[in-house]
Image (tube, rainbow, N blue to C red):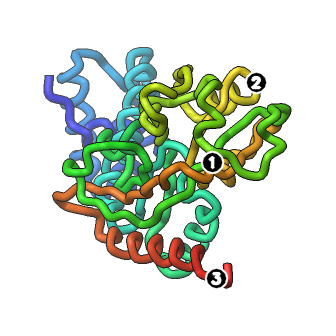
Amino acid sequence: MDLEVRQLRCLVAVVDAGTFTDAAIELGVSQAAVSRTVMALERELGVRLLHRTSRSVTPTTAGVRVLARARQVLAEVDELVIEATSGHTRLRIGHAWSALGRLTTEFQRRWAGEHPGIELQLIRTNTATGGLAEGLCDLAVVRTHIDLRRFAHVTVAQERRYAALPADDPLARKRTLTLDQLRDRTLSIDRRTGSTTVDLWPEEARPKVEYTHDVDDWLAAIASGRCVGVTPQATTTQYRRDGVVYRPLRDAPPVDVHLIWHRQDPHPATEAAVALLTSLFQESRSPTN
């Protein structure tokens, strides 16, 4: 069986227009061409799809079923076309947790002002590559320990690490903390997309670990009082949660923030995104901010 999209479009046009003549006008073809196309579809399917009279056309019982599915198929085809042709008019940036932290809104506003012809979409996907390897985005912001040789990348910033604590934890009363103060606690870790591992501690002084699946599970485990967490600064602004407080860690190494993209056929706006992100992070570190 070899159905064609034009056959389905013709069937839908005939039913929606009500006559072969009006459908032909809408499609920009002859009435005879519309009739031949519908009959070819009926032969291909082996069923009659339309009741024809001199004044009207209505779908048969089989036609009603085929028509409903045809509308779905045509909608998907239209989406496919948009997906394939929107590369220059839409930029999708994936992230697993915190996007750009407190700079997220400013990045969105600046991008809209500087690149009005390119729609920006931020897509949260709980994968190690922020959705890039899965084809869900054009670029991704990542803070995880991944093999950056697989992708083109640039390090746009380094972020300080923070401890995430239950609000009623005794350590929450302190202004800053050290990693050693967390060694006797249970550490909540998202091993797929989190930036924290027990390698931050000496082998003989590592905390116990409870693994979670995403940032919401991670926050829930901490708010419950059974865990603590360690996270980049971006999380502290992007995910404020009742029952969870954040405190800077004085002795923890910073987290590299990478922007990654496919080496082959990068999005045309990649260079502009890198430039804007780098500029925003530099501005955020200036003495006036």
Determine the residue positioned at 50% across, 57% down.
121
Determine the residue positioned at 44% across, 70% down.
118
Q: Residues within 10 Å of mark 1 (few under 14, many from 20)?
A: many
Spatial distance from mark 2 to mark 1, Cα to Cα?
17 Å
Element marked by disc 3: loop
Callout 2, which amino acid?
A: Gly
- Residue 145 seen: yes
Element marked by disc 2: loop
Residue extending farthest to the bottom is 288
Determine the residue positioned at 20% across, 30% down.
3
Residue 6 vs 69, above or below: the answer is below
Element marked by disc 1: strand
Q: Residues within 10 Å of mark 3 (few under 14, many from 20)?
A: few
Give the side of residue 195 with respect to residue 104, left or right: left
Q: Could you tell me if the residues under marks 2 and 1 are in contact, i.e. CB atoms within 8 Å?
A: no
Spatial distance from mark 3 to mark 2, Cα to Cα?
37 Å
**Along the viewing direction, whichever of 32 and 142 lies nearer the viewer:** 142
Name the image quarter holding the N terminus: top left
Callout 3, which amino acid?
A: Pro
Q: Which residue is disc 1 drawn over?
A: 162
Q: Could you tell me if the residues under marks 3 and 2 are in contact, i.e. CB atoms within 8 Å?
A: no
**Along the viewing direction, whichever of 236 and 66 lies nearer the viewer:** 236
* Residue 156, quarter of picture: bottom left
Q: Specify the label residue 274 is tagged with.
A: none
Query: At which x and y percent is residue 262?
Result: 24, 55
Residue 45 vs 249, above or below: the answer is above
Q: Which residue is disc 2 drawn over?
A: 225
Q: Which residue is disc 3 drawn over?
A: 287
Query: At which x and y percent is residue 30?
Result: 25, 53
